[in-house]
Image: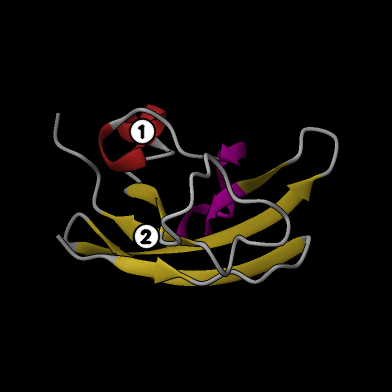
């Protein structure tokens, strides 16, 4: 399994493209991360650049969940787009990144699609 770190900053709207290894092939994705001030959490959209920017994930919240290794896109396994893990690196008792700490206390790690 190949893993890649997605670097974010403490800024409300972030857009970038990345080529990531997924299931033994390189996939090109467009990411849009945004802060939702009403719900008080980070969320993201994911598009497949190789498929006419087809929307793959829409407004997915970023928070620690009770799945293996906190794979926040586990419900999208059927799309074979990989996995996205959120890891609390701070040691603090936090269940989700805040507007001010996503780049300081958390790491987002992209990996292969889980085999269930």
Name the residue: 43% across, 32% down: 65
Asked which quadrant contains residue 9, the reply is: bottom right
Q: Which mark is residue 84?
A: none
Residue 69's place in the image compared with 48, above or below, is above
- The stretch of residues the image draws in magenta is 45-62
- Who's the residue at 21% across and 40% down the image? 114
Name the disc covering residue 109, or none: 2
Q: Secondary structure at mark 1?
A: helix
Residue 14 position within the rendered picture, expressed as x and y whole percent measured from the top left: 70, 65
Q: Main secondary structure of the magenta part?
A: strand
Q: Of helix, strand and loop, which one carries label 2?
A: strand
Q: Which residue extends farthest right?
A: 38
Q: Is residue 27 magenta?
A: no
User: Is residue 14 or residue 10 the one in the foreground?
Assistant: 10
> Is residue 52 rendered to the left or right of residue 76?
right
Task: Return the disc, 2 or 1, that comes first in the chain's sequence.
Answer: 1
Q: Which residue is mark 1?
A: 74
Distance from Cα at disc 2 to Cα at disc 1? 13 Å
Q: Residue furthest front?
A: 92
Percent coordinates x, y for residue 91 in the rendering? 41, 56
């Amino acid at each position: 399994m190949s893993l890649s770190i997605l670097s974010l900053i403490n800024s409300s709207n972030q857009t970038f493209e990345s080529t990531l290894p997924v299931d033994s092939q390189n996939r090109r994705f467009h990411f849009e991360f945004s802060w939702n001030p009403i719900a008080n959490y980070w969320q993201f959209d994911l598009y497949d650049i190789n498929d006419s920017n087809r929307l793959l994930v829409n407004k997915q919240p970023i928070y620690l969940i009770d799945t293996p290794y906190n794979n926040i896109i586990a419900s999208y396994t059927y799309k074979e787009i990989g996995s996205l893990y959120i890891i609390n690196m701070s040691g603090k008792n936090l269940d989700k990144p805040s507007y001010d700490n996503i780049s300081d206390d958390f790491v987002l790690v992209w990996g292969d699609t889980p085999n269930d």
